Each structure stands twice: as C-alpha cells, then as structure tokens.
Image: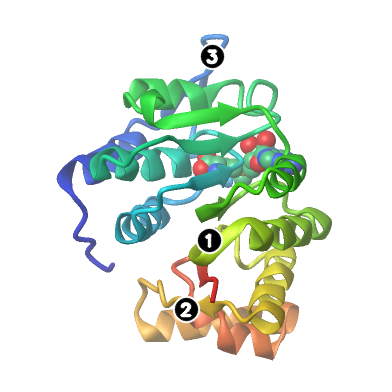
Amino acid sequence: MKSFNLPQPVTDTINNFYDDYMKIDQDGNTRDMRLGSGCPRREECFILADLYLQEKPLKSLDFGLGEGTACIALASARKHLGLQGKHITLDPFQFTLAKGIGLNELKKYELTDYVEFLEEKSEEFLYSEFHKNHKYDFVFVDGAHDIGHKVVDAFWIDQILNSGGLIVFHDSLFFSTSVAVRYLVEQKSYIILDVNVDPTWKSWSRALRHTPRLGKDFCFKYVPKMGKAVTALRKP
Ligand SMILES: C[S@@+](CC[C@H](N)C(=O)[O-])C[C@H]1O[C@@H](n2cnc3c(N)ncnc32)[C@H](O)[C@@H]1O
C-alpha cells in the first residue's frame, strides 16, 4: 500500500472513522459499516484527503453524504487547511436511507462547523448553482449511479467548475461513471490524474478483468490511473 504523508489529525480522523465501524443512526440503532455499504474504502479516503490538501479548494462540494465517509475525509482536510467558508455536502435521502448517520458522524468528529448540509438532489442543486453563477474548485461525485444521473451530474459540474478545478468520482468501474469520465476527457479535454496506489501488476490486472464489460479503450487508458475506484480529473 502507498504510504500517505497526511497531517496526523486527518489520518487519525479517517482511521478512527473506520476502526469505530458500528455507527449509530438517528433512531439510536446501530449499523455495522463492515457489511458492504458501498462507501469509499479507507485508502480511497486517504486519496481524497490527499487531493483536497494539495488543491486547497476555496469552494468544494460532495454528494451524496450517505454515511459520511468521504465527507469526513474532505472536511477534516478542510479543517486542517483553515480555509474560509464551508464545504457543501448534499443528500436528499440522508434521513431516510442513511438514517442520519452521515450527520451524526460529522458531529462526532467535530466537523459540523466546516460543512453545510443540504437535503437536495445533485441534479437540481447543480442546475441552480449554474443559474446563480456559483463556481467550485473541487467536486466529489458519489450520488445516484444510473447513467442519466451520472452524465447529467458531469455535464452540470463542468458548467460550474473553475478552470483548473477537480472533479473526482467514486465507483469508477460502474458503466455509468465510465461514460461520464469519457465525456469529460474525450469531449471536454479534462486531464486524468494518476492517483493509483497499487503495484503496476495489480492495476493492469484490474484493467484486463474489466475489459469485457467496459471496453479496451476505457480500461487501458483510465483504469491504471484510478486509485482503487477513484478517478480524479482536472478541468483545463
Ligand atoms: C454510495 S452512497 C454515498 C456514500 C457516501 N459518499 C459516503 O462516503 O459514505 C450514495 C448516496 O447518494 C445519495 N443520492 C441518491 N440520489 C442522489 C441525488 N440525486 N443527489 C444526491 N445524492 C443522492 C443516496 O442517498 C446515498 O446516500
């Protein structure tokens, strides 16, 4: 595993979030995060925090909040940087699907002061931010995974992202994400960053394994640069 040179408080927050895997929801029930929740993995959170610390984005956004995994990593990086303003996180289903766990976790790690939560859908929020002429420097995408949402989200994020800004996708091996990534790189000239953390043999064997489903072009060009299932693209 690649070693990350992150500030200790950021590393500790991410590790504590993972080590303390029994999460308490808004009704006082516990949920075991080890039972496959689709949230970013520990190493992916290190990649996200690392990118955020390097970029120092004044305006940042992620969706959906879900159990708060990614948001905790991003917000703890923001807290460490001491940036003005708050990171924005969206989730229209925070109180129904995630049962408030994301918000509870932000409170637990004393990150609420650094985050603004909105119970909104990405497709509506992004469109409305475009009309308000609000711009962003960093957007992490982990919301609805169907092709329609993924491509619409990519389209509107492109409209509101500053030049030089980053769009980062989770679940990059989903077909929907591959279409959004290809749209941004092949039609909007985004540059893919190399965030791979695995040995070369491992990332290339992943590329080969997914070729029948995602195609040779995508697998050979994009998969070896992913950090696990994270793809990071820079707007030209
Ligand atoms: C895989 S989970 C996200 C996990 C989360 N990023 C984490 O780190 O714990 C997907 C989330 O997207 C949310 N979601 C679904 N449709 C959405 C939409 N249209 N806009 C924003 N979020 C959405 C869901 O409520 C769910 O919490």
How crowded is the residue under tag 3: few (<14 C-alpha within 10 Å), some, or many (20+)? few
Report the residue at 40% width, 45% height from top.
Answer: 74
Q: Which mark is residue 91?
A: none
> What amino acid type should be assigned to the residue bearing mark 3?
Asn
Label 2, label 1: how far apart the Cα atoms are: 12 Å
SS for dot 2: helix
Quadrant where the C terminus sits is bottom right
Q: Left or right: 51 with respect to 206?
A: left
Location of mark 3 (residue): 29
- Location of residue 158 (image quadrant): bottom right
Report the residue at 35% width, 21% height from top.
Answer: 108
Label 2, label 3: how far apart the Cα atoms are: 39 Å
Location of mark 1 (residue): 168
> What amino acid type should be assigned to the residue bearing mark 1?
Val
Report the residue at 48% width, 72% height from top.
Answer: 226
Q: Nearer the viewer, residue 151 or 188?
A: 188
Q: Earlier in the sequence, mark 1 or mark 3?
A: 3
Ligand 1 - quadrant of the structure image: top right
How crowded is the residue under tag 1: few (<14 C-alpha within 10 Å), some, or many (20+)? many
Q: Are the two marked residues, 1 and 3, in contact with CB atoms closer than 8 angstroms?
A: no
Location of mark 2 (residue): 225
Q: Earlier in the sequence, mark 2 or mark 3?
A: 3
Label 1, label 3: how far apart the Cα atoms are: 32 Å
> What amino acid type should be assigned to the residue bearing mark 2?
Lys
Q: Residue 193, image x and y in percent?
A: 45, 76
Query: Does residue 147 lie above or below 59 as drawn?
Result: below
